[in-house]
Image: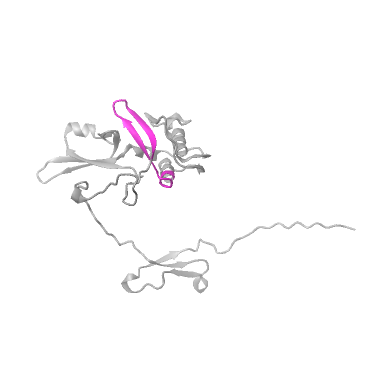
């Protein structure tokens, strides 16, 4: 569901420096385009200059827009996604917000259930990704380099796991050479498993609660949480109307 990324290493030549600039597009193959977001220049011990170019696929364009006007209606999930892209990136009321060459794919199959959805001022990509993840859908921009067209499309996820038998299974393994490299890292520097929560009140009268109090020894990593801004009471404003009858 996340935006794909890429990395390119190449010699630092005049031609490469001219072509590989921020926001330029890099054709990765088939219908995939990458947006150059990071440029690093380096020199090795022998004095050779190189460029390290990295970025994400051009679905990241949708991250540059917000849901400008309030969006609220009931429709199928894929239609919600298409409508929000159309209103905020393809054909917005303010033409300055339009993303060049971006259109909606025609004859899009309808996916997901019919449901009410609302968004306003949220990041467009975050709203779309939230809808997709919750309903087994993914979104991408399919690009035609020759025609300079970029089409937003919604796709249904396909289960390729061992637990199902309807689709061909995909197995990733270094023994099969479909994993070229692998890494593992563990960082526990920011890990805590016991929280002492202090709520409303002052000094001895302050209310406290401990999460996971039975942990012991070096397995116990304590964190203090200041929750004084959370009130444990509710205030109600009540108006009482009394009718008096004079005899």
Query: Foreground: 24 or 175?
Result: 175
Q: Residue furthest right?
A: 247
Q: Is residue 37 left or right of residue 133?
A: left
Asked if residue 134 lies in the magenta stretch, the reply is: yes
Q: Residue at x 52, y 66 (%)?
A: 200
Q: Residue furthest top?
A: 147
Is 205 above or below relative to 77? below
Q: Is residue 164 visible?
A: yes
Q: Is residue 38 visible?
A: no
Q: What is the magenta range?
A: 131-155
Rendered location of residue 35, percent (x, y): 30, 37
Asked if residue 221 lies in the magenta stretch, the reply is: no
Rendered location of residue 41, percent (x, y): 20, 41
Q: Is residue 239 left or right of residue 19?
A: right
Q: Residue furthest front?
A: 165
Q: Residue at x 18, y 50 (%)?
A: 175
Q: Residue at x 29, y 29 (%)?
A: 145
Image quarter where the N terminus lies is: top left
User: Main structural element of the magenta stretch: helix, strand or loop?
Assistant: strand
Is 80 above or below relative to 229? above
């Amino acid at each position: 569901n996340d935006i794909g990324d890429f990395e390119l290493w190449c010699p630092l030549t005049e031609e490469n420096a001219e072509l590989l600039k921020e926001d330029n597009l890099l054709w990765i193959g088939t219908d995939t385009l990458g947006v150059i977001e990071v440029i690093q220049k380096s020199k090795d011990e022998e004095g050779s200059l190189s460029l390290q170019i990295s970025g994400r696929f051009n679905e990241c364009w949708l991250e540059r827009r917000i849901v400008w006007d309030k969006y609220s209606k009931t429709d199928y999930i894929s239609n919600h996604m298409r409508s929000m892209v159309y209103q905020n990136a393809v054909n917005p009321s303010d033409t300055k917000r339009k993303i060049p060459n971006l259109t909606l794919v025609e004859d899009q199959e309808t996916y997901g259930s019919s449901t009410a959805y609302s968004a306003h001022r949220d990041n467009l990509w975050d709203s779309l990704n939230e809808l997709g993840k919750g309903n087994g859908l993914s979104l991408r921009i399919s690009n035609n380099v020759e025609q300079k067209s970029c089409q937003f499309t919604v796709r249904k996820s396909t289960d390729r796991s061992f637990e199902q038998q309807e689709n061909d299974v995909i197995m990733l393994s270094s023994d099969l050479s479909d994993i070229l490299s692998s890494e593992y890292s563990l960082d526990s520097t920011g890990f805590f498993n016991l929280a002492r929560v202090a709520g409303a009140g002052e000094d001895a009268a302050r209310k406290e609660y401990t999460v996971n109090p039975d942990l012991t020894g070096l397995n116990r990593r304590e964190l203090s949480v200041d929750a004084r801004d959370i009130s444990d009471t509710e205030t109600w404003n009540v108006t009482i109307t009394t009718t008096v009858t004079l005899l």
